[in-house]
Image (tube, rainbow, N blue to C red):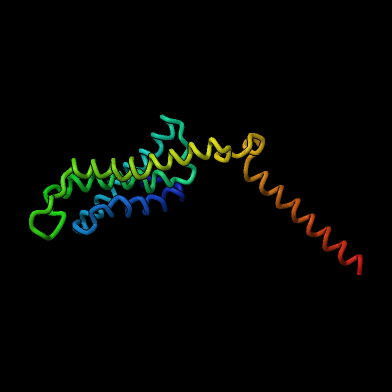
Amino acid sequence: IVSKGDPFWTFSGGLAGIITASAGNDLYHPIQAMLVAAIGVVIVYRLHFWVERKFKIDDAVGAVAVHGYSGVVGLIIAGFVLWGAPSSPYEGYAAVNPLGQLIGAVIMFGLLGFLPGWGLAKIQQAAGVLRIPREVELQGLDFSENRAFEAAQSDVINAEKAAVAEK
């Protein structure tokens, strides 16, 4: 329904639902998990295309949407759905709340995910290995890779013909 028949988002939606619900699967009732997953898929699907249009960021394989957006959305939803549920079976441990979930999401995704990734990208950019060459980018990576394969294949065939001719 959400993917409008797009096979990529049909399969990615299932994975996004699992990831969205996984933040609270140990405490959710099965019906809650199903509803959280369904709501999360709609949010993630729309968020993916909104970020793509608004910020011109291309997530070609949908990995950021399926894993990143689903994880954040799942953590925030779990904070509200499980509000007040104990986070541990032992006395004196904190209960789940939306603010704690939001702070945890910022720490996990921002400090331990985005910042190291951004730092590594800057190092790769400084070393000149972050992007493919401009000529290949204009030509298309698939086209240039396939042409290289054809050239290598013809070299192998010519070498085999030369080896047979020598015998």
Q: Nearer the viewer, residue 70 or 87?
A: 87
Q: How many labels sit on residues? A: 0
Which image quadrant for residue 135?
top right
Instruction: Please report the residue visible at 52 percent of the width from the left and 40 percent of the height from the top.
Output: 124
Residue 39 image offset from top left, x and y in percent:
27, 46
Residue 56 image offset from top left, x and y in percent:
46, 31
Instruction: Please report the residue visible at 63 percent of the width from the left and 40 percent of the height from the top.
Output: 140
Residue 167 image offset from top left, x and y in percent:
91, 70
Residue 158 image offset from top left, x and y in percent:
83, 58
Instruction: Please report the residue visible at 19 percent of the width from the left and 43 percent of the height from the top.
Output: 100
Q: Nearer the viewer, residue 154 or 115?
A: 115
Image side of residue 34 versus residue 81, left or right: right
Which image quadrant for residue 52?
top left
Image side of residue 108 versus residue 81, left or right: right
In the rendered image, the vertical position of residue 157 relative to residue 101, given as above or below: below
In the rendered image, the vertical position of residue 93 relative to residue 54, given as above or below: below
Image side of residue 90 versus residue 144, left or right: left
| Whether residue 119 is visible | yes
What residue occupies the far top of the structure in this picture?
Answer: 54
Which image quadrant for residue 144?
top right
Instruction: Please report the residue visible at 14 percent of the width from the left and 47 percent of the height from the top.
Output: 83
What residue occupies the far bottom of the structure in this picture?
Answer: 167
| Whether residue 5 is visible | no
